[in-house]
C-alpha cells in the first residue's frame, strides 16, 4: 500500500515537473519566433503579438491541467482503494 502511495507521489512530481518544463521550452521557442517575425516585418508585430498571447494561454492551460490531475492524484488517490479491493478478491475475502 505504501509502495502505491510512494509511486503516486513520484508520478505526480514527474507529471507537474515535465509539464512545466515542456511549457517553458514551448514559451521560449514561441517568444523567439515572435521576436524574429517582428524584426523581419515590424508592421505585423501587433497581429503576431495577439497570436502569441493566445498560444501562451493555451500552453499554460496544458500545464494547469497537469497540475490539476497531479493534485487529484495527491489528495483523492483512487489507486490504494483499487489495490485493496484487488487484494481482497485475490485472497478470497
Image: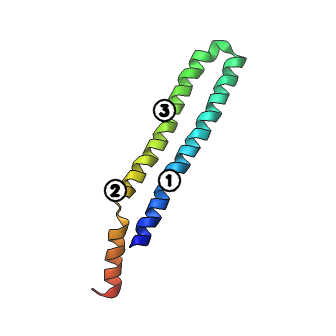
Task: Tell me if residue 57 comes above or below residue 11 in the rendering.
Answer: above
- For disc 2, the marked residue is 75
Indicate which disc, 3 or 1, sits on the residue closer to the N terminus. 1
- For disc 1, the marked residue is 15
Could you say whether the residue bearing mark 3 is in a helix, strand or loop? helix
* Left or right of residue 80: residue 12: right
Residue at left offset 42%, top offset 53%: 70
Q: Residue 33: which quarter of the image?
A: top right
Nearer the camera: disc 3 or disc 2: 2
Tag 3: Cα neighbours inside 10 Å, few (<14), some, or many (≥20)?
Answer: few
Q: Position of residue 86 (x, y in %)?
A: 35, 77
* Left or right of residue 48: residue 89: left
Tag 1: Cα neighbours inside 10 Å, few (<14), some, or many (≥20)?
Answer: some
Image quadrant occupied by the N terminus: bottom left
Residue at left offset 58%, top offset 39%: 24
Give the distance between the C-alpha atoms of the residues marked 3 and 2, in whole angstroms.
27 Å
Contact (Cβ within 8 Å) of mark 3 with mark 2: no
Tag 2: Cα neighbours inside 10 Å, few (<14), some, or many (≥20)?
Answer: few
Task: Tell me if residue 60 comes above or below residue 74 in the rendering.
Answer: above
- For disc 3, the marked residue is 57
Indicate which disc, 3 or 2, sits on the residue closer to the N terminus. 3
Residue at left offset 57%, top offset 18%: 47
Towards the viewer: 77 or 52: 77
Give the distance between the C-alpha atoms of the residues marked 2 and 1, in whole angstroms.
15 Å
Amino acid at each position: 500500500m505504501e509502495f502505491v502511495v510512494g509511486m503516486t507521489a513520484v508520478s505526480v512530481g514527474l507529471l507537474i515537473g515535465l509539464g512545466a518544463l515542456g511549457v517553458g521550452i514551448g514559451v521560449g521557442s514561441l517568444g523567439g519566433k515572435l521576436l524574429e517575425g517582428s524584426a523581419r516585418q515590424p508592421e505585423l508585430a501587433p497581429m503576431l503579438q495577439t497570436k502569441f498571447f493566445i498560444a501562451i494561454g493555451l500552453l499554460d492551460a496544458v500545464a494547469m491541467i497537469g497540475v490539476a490531475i497531479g493534485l487529484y492524484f495527491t489528495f483523492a488517490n483512487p489507486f490504494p482503494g483499487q489495490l485493496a479491493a484487488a487484494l481482497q478478491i485475490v485472497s478470497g475475502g
